[in-house]
Amino acid sequence: MHVTSVTTEAARKPDRGGKSVRELGEGEGDSGPPSGDGGGRRKIAATLVVGLVLMAAVGAVALATQAPPRVVRISYPGVKAVNRTGVVSIGFTTGAPTICQGREVLPSGISAVRVSVWGFFGPRVRLTAYQGSRLLTEGTRSGGWVGDSVTVPVKPVTRAAGGVRLCVALSPNEEPMVLLGANTPQAQAATFTEPSAPGETRTLNGRMVAEYLAAGHGSWWSRVVAVARHAGLGRALSGTWIALLILLLMVAIAGLTVGLILRDAP
């Protein structure tokens, strides 16, 4: 009984750090393997990667099945649609102007109008088309577009119309905007108004570039060969195989990325 009592007291006696021997054995003294499920985390990473790849594939297929828009009419004189030779600056603004021009012909079947306005961070655009006082179609494009043109979707037009007045209204924006078009006589030029001076109308140096778009006849899948052929033009090594090489490089990069993610998963 005396020995048992001594042993129990020694086990309960705290060490210099203030912890008993029993506590050390149950906590800090335990050097077993760390808890954690590395295999489970790798499965989660693999599932995430597979999900992202499937989402990208489904998005690409859905995009390829759509028909690209086609230009059914170009309403700027002296300008070729392929390289837009002859396009010049006809105006400059940083406010919220409305640009209008008459003598437009609105083709039937159109679903969008593309106007040439240069903007680094374009504002909201509202487009309207009138024949006299009757509104034929209208549409709005949200802000944030970049480039030298903006495509505005409009309500489908079922019948062609002539003598149309096309107006483009830009929302207030501090970024400089350049209006692009072709020089014309003053009688055919577009007009320019601003909310700050509603009674003042200014005539520009020409007419805006306007392209009327309708749905295409074939999907992107039907144009794969033509797109591949154009991708191989204008290079030191030309040919349709250039597009295949680019596709293989993209697949290789995606595969390496997936491999690195799975390898580095804890």
Image (spheres, rainbow, N blue to C red):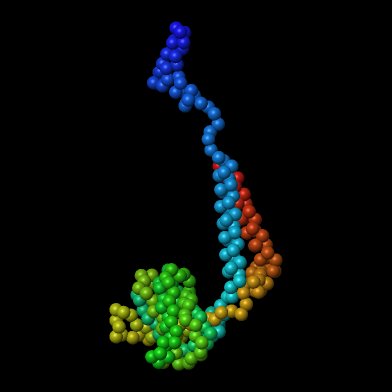
Q: Residue at x 59, y 50 (%)?
A: 46
| Rendered position, 80 above or below 17 | below
Q: Residue at x 46, y 21 (%)?
A: 22
Residue 132 spot, x, y in % from top left: 40, 92
In the rendered image, the residue lying farthest to the top is: 2
Q: Is residue 53 visible?
A: yes
| Rendered position, 33 above or below 262 | above
Q: 17 or 6: which is nearer to us? A: 6
Residue 214 spot, x, y in % from top left: 54, 81
Q: Residue at x 56, y 52 (%)?
A: 48
Q: 183 or 207: which is nearer to us? A: 207
Residue 20 spot, x, y in % from top left: 42, 20
- Residue 55 sits in which quadrant? bottom right
- Residue 179 sits in which quadrant? bottom left
Q: Is residue 76 visible?
A: no
Q: Residue at x 57, y 41 (%)?
A: 38
